[in-house]
Image (cartoon, grey):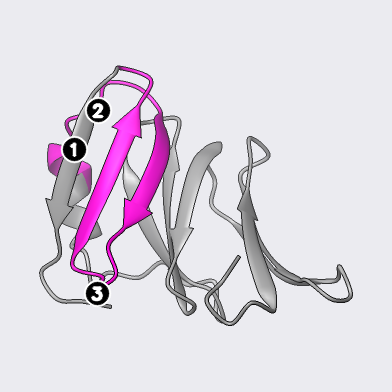
Amino acid sequence: MLPCGKRAVTCSDDQLLQVIDISSGRTLNTIDTGEPLRAVVCDGNNAIVGGEGGYLRQFDLQTGVEETGGFDVAALKKRSPHRGAITCIDLDRDKKRLLTGGDDSVVALWTAEASF
């Protein structure tokens, strides 16, 4: 559930990231990421997803555009410690640190270049 309490974000093996209105159950936005997804964390405007390939990607929930701000996701793709799917993600309250866990039993702590 997003911080506003009115929307939720889901991800799945069908490669879709979906924003859903809680009260109506209506899908507000669908983003095709092109990769089976296993985990998602959101701050209300952006979502960071972890997929089968062990990499993180960041999307704007309104536009569906893959973002490069906040966490340097391009750099994370080059140096991900995961050797398998990312299965859980958590973001600290300051939105400056991200914790990931994966199928490979690795837990990684990331620090943002700038908060998003």
Please state the extent of the stretch shown in magenta in the rendering. 77-104
Q: Which residue in the protein does label 2 denote?
A: 82
Q: Which residue in the protein does label 3 denote?
A: 69
Residue 46 at x, y percent in the picture:
44, 72
Between discs 3 and 2, the one toward the N terminus: 3
Q: Crowding at label 2, few (<14), some or many (≥20) Cα neighbours within 10 Å?
A: some
Q: What type is the residue that disc 2 sits on?
A: His
Q: Quadrant of residue 78?
A: top left
Q: Are marks 2 and 1 in contact (CB under 8 Å)?
A: yes
Answer with left or right where residue 34 lies relative to residue 100: right
Between discs 1 and 3, the one toward the N terminus: 3
In which quadrant of the rendered image does the C terminus lie? bottom left
Between residues 106 and 50, which one lies in front from this camera angle?
A: 106
Q: What type is the residue that disc 1 sits on?
A: Ala
Between discs 2 and 1, the one toward the N terminus: 2
For marks 3 and 2, give the CA distance.
22 Å
Task: State the mark number for residue 12.
Answer: none
Q: Which residue in the protein does label 1 denote?
A: 108
